[in-house]
Amino acid sequence: MNNNIKGLILIIVGMLFIITQDVLIKYTIHDASLMQILVFRGGVGFSLLCLYLIYTKQPIFFGTAHPYIAIFRGSTFFFGFTLFFISLSEITLAEATSLFFVSPFFITIYSYFILNIKIGLNRIFSIFVGFSGTLLIIKPEFNEINIYMLFPIIAAATYALSMTLAKKTSKHDSLFQQTFHIYIGAFLGGSAISILLHNSDFNLSIFSILSNPWIFNDLQFIGLILFISTTGSLGIFCLIAAYRVGSPLVNSITEYVHLIFAIIIGIIIFSEVPDINSFIGIFLIMVSGIFVIFRENKREELVVSKTTLRT
């Protein structure tokens, strides 16, 4: 079995883990504490990564050569995915997932400003097409907009920013260090918000779900949270492993299987059937996102070939 096939399988398995996490969070979010889930997930992910490094006899190091960027990455990543999970309480799984998949367009934009990578007309057009797809899903009206539809887009923007900054600091911070920073950010961020909400009269309706109390006296529920945390962490590890062994181009395109899983599971479990406009919007996001991935792959191949010619 070649490495690209291994990477493809790891991506699919990883997406199955992640969609399982998303489904369980959506199923329990009105009764469970989202902050408790995120704190547990950060702790479980941190522990599993430590065990993996011990098993592979690699050093455990979660310091950073860029402390301010690391803190910013961890905070924005946590903030974005908190909003994504909140959105699952009010919009369909397919809508939330498809809106999140505008992240390649944000990565393209951030790459221009942060990494000084030029953007051609083709990519500008693909960004326009992709965001047109988001409008078909959101279906904004002049007098009203569903604020929860904006949350996955904000999550995509923060995720893309985190990935762009990871690229910028990759020469000094390893992939495992950067992953530690994400888990630490989730653990500390969730803990801090829980403490603040417990000692305040916070009642903003769109964020009221964050004030659900932590539960410690229900072993079945604790087991469910640990299962959610483990599936989410295993999903991330599968993605990390996939990008270490397989082609980034094949892996990036295969990630869209997550969107297909979200549509199918949303219909089967939650009876959420997207309307025709949403299906068209999802299609536009997928096609334009895949186009951006292809263009990025061609750009990297050109850089590699030019470097090879110089050496």
Image: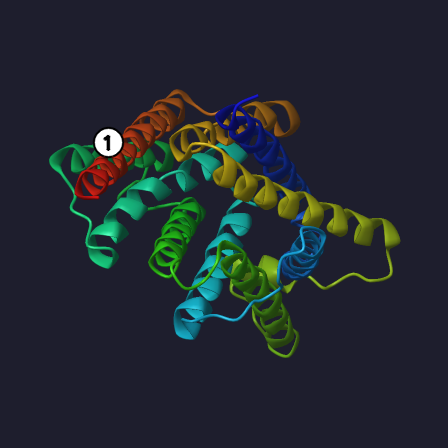
- Residue drawn at x 16%, y 46% is 118
x and y percentages locating residue 132 in the rendered image: 26, 33
Can you identify the residue that label 1 sits on? Answer: 129
Left or right of residue 226: residue 83: left
- Residue drawn at x 43%, y 63% is 73
Q: Is residue 176 above or below residue 123?
A: below
Residue ranking furthest to the front:
311
- Give the SS element for disc 1: helix
Number of labelled discs?
1
Most foreground residue, 229 or 262:
229
- Name the amino acid, label 1: Val
x and y percentages locating residue 6 in the rendered image: 56, 28
Most foreground residue, 21 or 293:
293
- Residue drawn at x 70%, y 47% is 230
Residue 303 lies in what quarter of the image?
A: top left
Kindly tell me whether residue 272 is visible in this rendering.
no
x and y percentages locating residue 270 in the rendered image: 62, 30
Kindly tell me whether residue 48 is visible in this rendering.
yes
Q: Is residue 280 above or below residue 143?
A: above
Which quadrant holds the N terminus? top right
- What colour scheme does the image use? rainbow
x and y percentages locating residue 244 in the rendered image: 50, 41
Left or right of residue 1: residue 292: left
Left or right of residue 161: residue 220: right
Which quadrant holds the C terminus? top left
Left or right of residue 83: residue 150: left
Q: Is residue 101 above or below residue 59?
A: above
Residue ranking furthest to the bottom:
199
